[in-house]
Each structure stands twice: as C-alpha cells, then as structure tokens.
Amino acid sequence: MRRTSWLWPVLAPLRFDESGIGPKLMHESFINYRNHRYGVFAVALCLGAVVTSLIDSRREPQNGGTWLGYTLGSIAALLICYLALYGVRRRSFKSPAGSAAGWLSAHVYLGVAVLCIATLHCGFQFGWNVHTSAFVLMLLVSISGCWGVYVYARYPGLMIRQRGNSSRETLLEQLSTLDRRARLLVSALDERLQSYVEEAIRRTHLGGGVWAQLRGRDRSTILIPDALRGPPFARIVSNEGQHVLIQRLAQEHAGAHEASFAAKLQDLLEVASEKAVLVGKLQKDIQLQGLLQFWLYCHLPLCFGLLAALVIHVLAVFLYR
Ligand code: HEM
C-alpha cells in the first residue's frame, strides 16, 4: 500500500509487517494515539459536563435555554464544526496542522463525546421538531462513525488472511493463468467441450455495481444447449462456483472410455475447481473492500445533513425564542 492512500493512517497500524511499515506505526494506532490523549480529554469533558449538569439541575431543570444549556450547546456546535473539518484535513496530505493519525484519534473520541454533551444540552427533551432532527442526525453520524471504526479494525486483516497474503493483482494473474491452462487442455478435445469451457471463461463475472459488490455473490453464467428445444437453441444459466461447468465435465469424465481423454478431463476438472476457489476468494475480497468503503458513503452525507440541521436549529432558537 502506498503511503498516500486515504486509508493509510487507519490501515497502517493494522497491517502485518509485510510492506515496510515503520515500527512506530505498527503499535500506535488512532485508538491508542499518544497514550489515548484524546480519549482522556473526551472522558474529562464528558465528566465535567455530567457533574456540572447534576449540580445545576438542583437549581432548575436542565434544558437548552439555561445558561448551562447554552454553554453545552455552544461546545457541541463547535465540536461538530471541528469534526466536520476533518473532511478537509483528510484531503490535504501535506497539511502542517497536526498528523493525520492525531486528527483521526481526536475525531473518533470527540465524535463520541459530542453525543454526551448534546444530550445534556437538551436535557433529554425530545419531540417532533427541527431541534430533535438535528440530534437524530448527529446520532446517525456517530453510529455510522462507530461502524467505520469497527470496519477499519476488522476488515483489513480479514482481507489479507482470506487472500492468503497475496495481493488482488496476484489472484487475478492466477485466474488468467488458469483460463489459459483450461483453453490449452480443451483445445485437444471436441468442439462441444471447447465452446463450453470458452463460454464459462467468457461469462465469469467479478464485482459489478454497488449492491453486487456488497452482496459478494458470484454472478458468473454459462450458455448451455436448451435441452427442451435442442440445438441451435441455448440458454444462459447461473454458473455460480463454476458449478455447471464442473458438473458437465464430471459427466463427460464418468462416460469417458479412452484413458487419454479421461486424463485430459481430469486435468480440466482440477483447473475448473481451482478456478471456482479463486473466483470465490476474489468475490469475497471485492465484497470486503466494498464494505470497507461503504460506511463512509453514509457518514459523509449524514454529516452534511447534520451541518444543515445545526444551522436551522441555531437560527430557529435565536429567531423564534
Ligand atoms: C457529529 C459527529 C461527526 C461528524 C460531524 C463527523 C464528520 C466526519 C467527516 C466530515 C469525515 C470525513 C469524510 C470524508 O472526508 O470523506 C469523517 C470521517 C470519519 N469519521 Fe466522522 N464524524 C462524526 C462522528 C464520528 C464518530 C463518533 C466516529 C467514530 C467513533 C467517526 C469516525 C470516522 C472515521 C473512522 C472517519 C474516516 C477516517 C478516514 O478514513 O480517514 N466519526 N467524519
């Protein structure tokens, strides 16, 4: 992985020692960045807010309109603006404003803390209004952020393990090698089998649209003769896991009389089975990669929604008090 990758600050601490990653980054992630500096700050902030709210609630019931309500609301709004600024920092690789890992660490801890501050700010007074919609959006942004942290912590390792420490490029090269071998083996056999194998290769399907990637299903197909109407009619059926091709080759193998023919079919069967495993691995890899990025497509739009709702909330408070 190149250092400039947008996943670098997150993935670096999670990667195995295979790509020249420095030892310092190997054990310091955004979670334990500088001995949990931002975690400690976030906890202190929340504790301070809870204690002050408890003391103040003896005087008057907590809500957004008290002096403490305004103070906590201002802190929450400033925190949200700071959290949103992370989107800018994330795109400026040479920014002098602190390290990317430090920003992410602060983002994660303060992103959780803002939930506590905003809840105390409104004093648990929720309703069907613009104020609560801002709160709900903040909750959704934070939940999607937590989902992101889980995904970053779990999937990179899973991807490396399930690929067997190879890169996706290597797996794709192996796939074309297997296809070449299959074509070579079948070239010595009859035309019927040749078109079968060729069809299976041509219709092997990897990836696809967003949902196809996220579902991770093998959408390979194959063109087979239509058993009901006979030649030249044919139909396309699913060849998930190279199942139809393998079944067909196994049938031919079972009925083979010549030893050399049977041996060629046996080799073809092995190639088709290897390919089925490889396609499964690639499909899973594409799925995990998709899941690794998908949450961010929820987090960012929700963040924009939150900023808009926050502006409306503040305007509504000051204009219609
Ligand atoms: C009100 C709260 C939050 C706001 C406004 C916010 C906003 C943002 C923004 C604007 C980005 C950059 C997205 C981009 O550039 O594509 C981002 C990324 C991110 N946020 Fe949040 N966020 C919030 C809460 C959280 C929370 C609570 C967590 C986790 C506990 C979190 C985890 C993340 C992560 C992991 C990234 C991506 C890091 C990366 O790939 O560099 N966020 N957030």
Image (cartoon, helix red, strand yellow):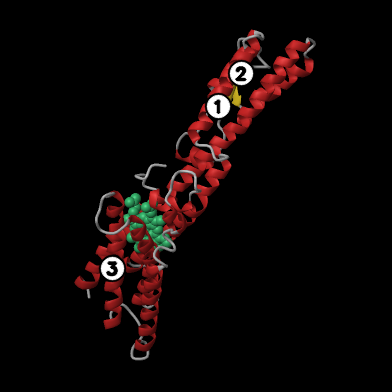
**Sequence order check: which comes first, mark 3 or mark 2?**
3
* 3D distance between C-alphas at marks 3 and 2: 62 Å
Report the mark closest to the observer, 3 or 2. Answer: 2
Bin the neighbour count of mark 3 within 10 Å (Cα to Cα): few under 14, some 14-19, many 20 and up.
some
The residue located at (26%, 50%) in the rendering is 94
* 3D distance between C-alphas at marks 3 and 1: 52 Å
Mark 2: amino acid: Ala
The residue located at (40%, 72%) in the rendering is 40
The residue located at (54%, 35%) in the rendering is 282
Element at badge 1? helix
Mark 1: amino acid: Leu
| Contact (Cβ within 8 Å) of mark 1 with mark 2 | no
> Which residue is under mark 1?
175
**Sequence order check: which comes first, mark 1 or mark 2?**
1
Q: Please provide percent x and percent y for residue 24.
A: 42, 56
**Sequence order check: which comes first, mark 3 or mark 1?**
3
> Which residue is under mark 2?
182
Whether residue 126 can be seen here: no
